[in-house]
Image (spheres, rainbow, N blue to C red):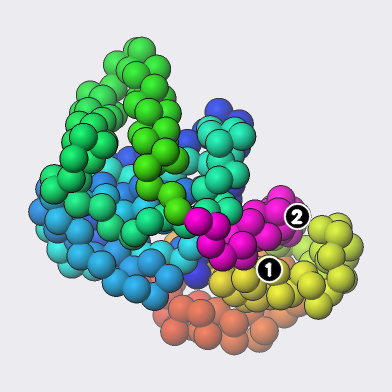
Amino acid sequence: MLYQPLLVGKDTYFLQTGDATGFELHRHPEMELSFCLSGDYRVIVEGEEFLLQAGDLVLIRPMAAHEYPEGGTGRRLTAELGPGFLGEYFRPLVNMTFSRRIFRLTEGGEVFSALHELLHETSTLWETRSEFSGLAIRGNLFRISALILQHFLTAPGDTSSARSLRDVARIELALEMIHERYASPLDLDCVCEACGFSKSSFCRIFKKITGNTFHNVLNRHRVEVACLHLRDSSLPVAEISVAVGFADAKSFCRVFRSITGESPGVYRRRHS
């Protein structure tokens, strides 16, 4: 499962329009809104599958596992809103649950109509961006968030998301260490100490947040970097294995094949 890092700094929200299909299983600390602009597409949230049609809105809680399978003809507006954008108003999203998963905005009353109009307007603003359209987009996202907080939340639900969010900052450090220090040996004990966890707690929480073990995530990243070397350089496989952090070429080839389904040599020939 893909883990997307917390949006921070300038990028306190994420917005995108376009094709609605073919995004693998993933999770992130932000709330996600997926609004069907046209056509239809499927979304799977925490193992439950839904079909969205034009005018449908799905709300995905922070840290909920979700994916957009291949197929369908829909276009969607996607917005991810986290604590950096919503500030103090983000906490209710973590501790509460949505009154339902799918909202058919074309069939509701005043609130649904207002949301429907705001989402379409936001999509248009995003696709026709100008120098100051960012201000209007942010304003719309705040209004959309206010309507959701006021009308779409029910009693407190599962608190596992809240606990996960408190752990995200420390697990983020482990992910940064993978991306920055993959080429050198990464001792699990040192990583656990840097993140402030015991080994057993770290392994359990890391897998809960990322959907995979630390060593699997590390090896997958090393193989992804190795694929770049194989495609874009003429370095021998033995040198690439060392460059991406493996002790020897034999171990590298074994892990590479387990992840990609083929040897480094076959991969290179296919992409040459």
Give the residue at mark 1.
Answer: 206
Q: Which residue lies furthest to the top in this view?
A: 132
* Distance between the alpha carbons at the discs numbered 2 and 1: 9 Å
Q: Which residue corresponds to the image point at 68% horizontal and 68% vertical from the top-left?
A: 206
Q: Which residue corresponds to the image point at 84% horizontal and 65% vertical from the top-left?
A: 197
Q: Which mark is residue 115?
A: none
Q: Position of residue 67 (x, y in %)?
A: 36, 65
Type of amino acid under label 1: Phe
Mark before the other along the chain sequence, 2 or 1? 2
Graded by Cα atoms within 10 Å as few (under 14), some (14 to 19) or many (20 or more), the crowding at tag 2 reads some
In the image, is 259 to the left or to the right of 46? right
Q: Residue 162 lies in magenta, yes or no? A: yes
Q: Which residue corresponds to the image point at 50% horizontal and 70% vertical from the top-left?
A: 1
Decide: marks 2, 1 in contact (CB < 8 A)? Answer: no
Type of amino acid under label 2: Arg
Q: Is residue 227 visible?
A: no
Q: Quadrant of the C terminus?
A: bottom left
Q: Main secondary structure of the magenta part?
A: helix
Q: Is residue 202 visible?
A: yes
Quarter of the figure with residue 174: bottom right
Q: Position of residue 92 (x, y in %)?
A: 55, 45
Q: Residue 87 lies in magenta, yes or no? A: no
Q: Nearer the viewer, residue 8 or 235?
A: 8
Give, as a single range, the part of the protein colored magenta: 155-174
Give the residue at mark 2.
Answer: 170
